[in-house]
Structure formats: structure tokens, C-alpha cells
Amino acid sequence: MNLRKLILTNNACYKAGRTITPQGIMLHSTGANNPWLRRYVGPDDGLLGVNRHNNHWNQERPDGRQVCVHAFIGRLADGSIATYKTLPWNHRGWHCGRGPRGSGNDTHISVEICEDNLTGAAYFRRVYNEAVELCVYLCGQFSLTEVDIISHSEGFRLGIASNHADVMHWFPRHGKIMDSFRADVRKELAERAAPVPAYEIYTVVKGDSLWKIAAARLGSGARHPEISELNALSSGTIVAGQKLKIPK
Ligand SMILES: [Zn+2]
């Protein structure tokens, strides 16, 4: 993930200054063929590039609308993919309107993916992976899991968002749905939670004995039973090239 920060301090949403306790993440996509971050994030920080129309969202009412999100994913001027944090994560965003059961603005961190023309497979793969990584990071920050991640369209069905189709008008074109997105986040979360093995691997060389290895690696030859136990050795015989786990 290439996470950068440019808070949209001129946006009326930022100025409203309300905060939330994030209880989930809502995925959006922009609904316009413009993968360049500079369309939405500005002014140019040397990486975004110049928005010649000056219509980015760092202004009171972008495109005349009351709208602001927590992060954008899209292209930098050099074509590489980045995430821009555009509101503090616990700021109340203006991203999903409301439904009969309330508003996701009060509960959800909003992530907006810049769309291309929806057909670019390479671009999709890169922004999709960036979104997975961002969500994994945010889950860690706010004690969330993949089940707390929804799309705008799912938010509408849950009664907490306006009737928009994103991101489900786009993801299925590239073989993905929200369930696969959540599965990909879950996989990454599980990998990160996996315990770090409390041993290192040592390869036996000619002339080694368990006593010698324990003396060199553990500081005392008398600790050799720890190596025997960790490796379930039934005798003290070891051979050159054998790989042994050494306790850390
Ligand atoms: Zn949306």
C-alpha cells in the first residue's frame, strides 16, 4: 500500500468537524471515467499532478455538492497507484446519504476508488489490491474484521445509504464481488495474525554435536535438550545437512 495524506481542509465536511467511532468501512467508486487522483485530491503535492480545472474536492462544495470521503485510491501523475487519506479516519464523512435505518456517515469510514472506463483489467487489479491492503490496515487500526466492510450498494440494502450501485457495477466485470473482497481481506488478516515461529532454522555442519550447537546458539551446551525436544529427536545423533529448529 502506498498511503499518503492530504486532508481536504477547505471542504465544508472537514470544517463541520464532527467525529465518529468507526464501526465499519464502506467501499465506493467514483462513477466517472477518471482514474487520476488529481481530479479529487489537491492541490498538487508534486506527485498528484496539476488539476487544470481546479475542481478537486479540497474546496467548500466540490461540484456544488456536500460531499467528502476519507480516502481515495487511484493514479498518481506517474501512473502508479496510491491511497490518499483525505479526512481523519474518525471524522464524520459525507459519502452515503441516508436510508430508513440511519446513515452510514455516522458509522463508516469511506473509501472511494477512482474508476477508469471499467474495462482495464490491470488497473482494476492494482486498485483492488490497494483497497484490500487499506482495509486490512483500517481493520487493524479500529479492531474491525472483513464482515464490517460493505459497499455503497450493500449500505443501501441495509437501509443506511442512498440508492447507488457502486461498487457492484464494476467489480463483477473483473470476476470480483464484495464476498470475494471480504475473503481477500480475511486472508490477509489471518496471515498477519499468524504467530511468528519462536525458532530459527540451523543447518548442521560436519563435526557438529547438539552440545556444540547449544553452546554456540543458546549460550550453554547444557541446554541441548531444548533442541532435542523442539525437533522431537529420539537420539543425540545428527548429520551434516540436517535442518534443526533452534529456540529463540
Ligand atoms: Zn458511493
Image: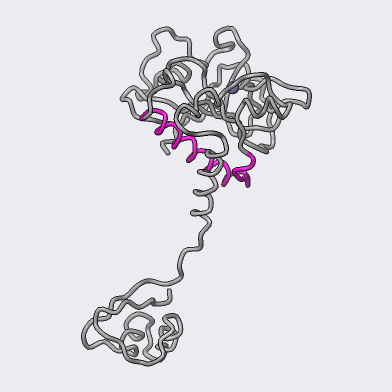
Residue 134 among those drawn in magenta: yes
**Who's the residue at 48% across and 15% down the image?**
32
Image coordinates for residue 157, horizontal then vertical, percent:
70, 27
Q: Quadrant of ligand 1?
A: top right
- Could you say which quadrant of the image residue 225 lies in? bottom left
Q: Position of residue 137 (x, y in %)?
A: 52, 43
The scheme the figure's colours follow is one colour
Residue 241: give x, y in percent of width and height.
25, 78
Return the residue nearer the eye: 139 or 148. Answer: 148
| Farthest right residue in view | 100
Residue 59: x percent and y percent? 54, 13
Query: Mainly helix, strand or loop, the magenta region?
Result: helix
Name the residue nearer the viewer: 183 or 126: 183
Quadrant housing the N terminus = top left
Instruction: Give above or below for 71 relative to 136.
Output: above
Q: For the C terminus, which image quadrant?
A: bottom left
When the figure is inspected, residue 195 is found, relative to residue 234, above or below; the finding is above
The span picked out in magenta is 122-148
| Residue positioned 36% across, 90% down in the render | 221
Residue at 49% of width from left, 39% of height from top? 132
**Residue 145 falls inside the magenta stretch:** yes
- Please give the count of numbered marks on the rendered protein: 0
